[in-house]
Image: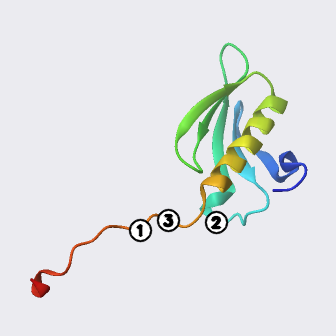
Amino acid sequence: MSADPVHQLTLEALAPGAWRLCNSRVSRADAANLLAYVEEAADGGYDVTWVHGGSGTAWFPTVDELLLGGARHLAACASRRGKPKPIAHRPPLAAL
C-alpha cells in the first residue's frame, strides 16, 4: 500500500446524495474497482455499504473520515489475501 492510500480512492457521483467509492489503481473493468456505495445520511454524515472485501456497513461523519475508513478497509482486505486454505476431500467413489 502506498504512503498515502487515500489518494487512490475516488468518489463518483451516482445521483444527488449518492456516490460510489472506487479504487483508482484498479481497472474500471475489474469488479475490485468498486469498494462501496455511499449515501448522504438523513441526520448528517455518510452511510457506507461495503461491496469489495465482504459485505457490511459503516457510518462516517465527514468525507475525510469516509476516505480514511475506505483506506483502512482496503488495507484490511489486502492483509486477508494470501494462500487459500486447502479444501478437505475424500477419495473418489471408484477408489473404494
Residue 52, position as x, y percentages in the image: 60, 50
Residue at the spot of label 2: 30
Q: What kind of element bears circle 3?
A: loop
- Amino acid type assigned to the residue bearing label 2 in the image: Asp
Q: Is residue 25 left or right of residue 33?
A: right
Q: Is residue 69 visible?
A: yes
Residue at the spot of label 1: 86
C-alpha distance separating marks 3 and 1: 6 Å
Residue 22, position as x, y percentages in the image: 72, 51
Q: Is residue 65 left or right of residue 95?
A: right
Mark identifier at residue 36: none
C-alpha distance separating marks 3 and 2: 21 Å
Which picture quadrant has residue 89?
bottom left
Residue at the spot of label 3: 84
Q: Nearer the viewer, mark 2 or mark 1?
A: 1
- Amino acid type assigned to the residue bearing label 3 in the image: Pro
Which residue sits at x=79%, y=57%? 24
Residue 25, position as x, y percentages in the image: 79, 62
In which quadrant is the C terminus drawn?
Answer: bottom left
C-alpha distance separating marks 2 and 1: 26 Å
Which residue sits at x=36%, y=67%? 87
Q: Is residue 13 visible?
A: no
Disc 3 and disc 1 in contact, CB within 8 angstroms? yes
- Pick whichever of labels 2 and 1 is earlier in the sequence: 2
In this view, 76 is above or below 16: below
Q: Nearer the viewer, mark 3 or mark 2?
A: 3
Q: Is residue 41 left or right of residue 62?
A: left
Disc 2 and disc 1 in contact, CB within 8 angstroms? no
In this view, 61 is above or below 48: above
Which picture quadrant has residue 49?
top right
Name the foreground residue: 88 vs 70: 88
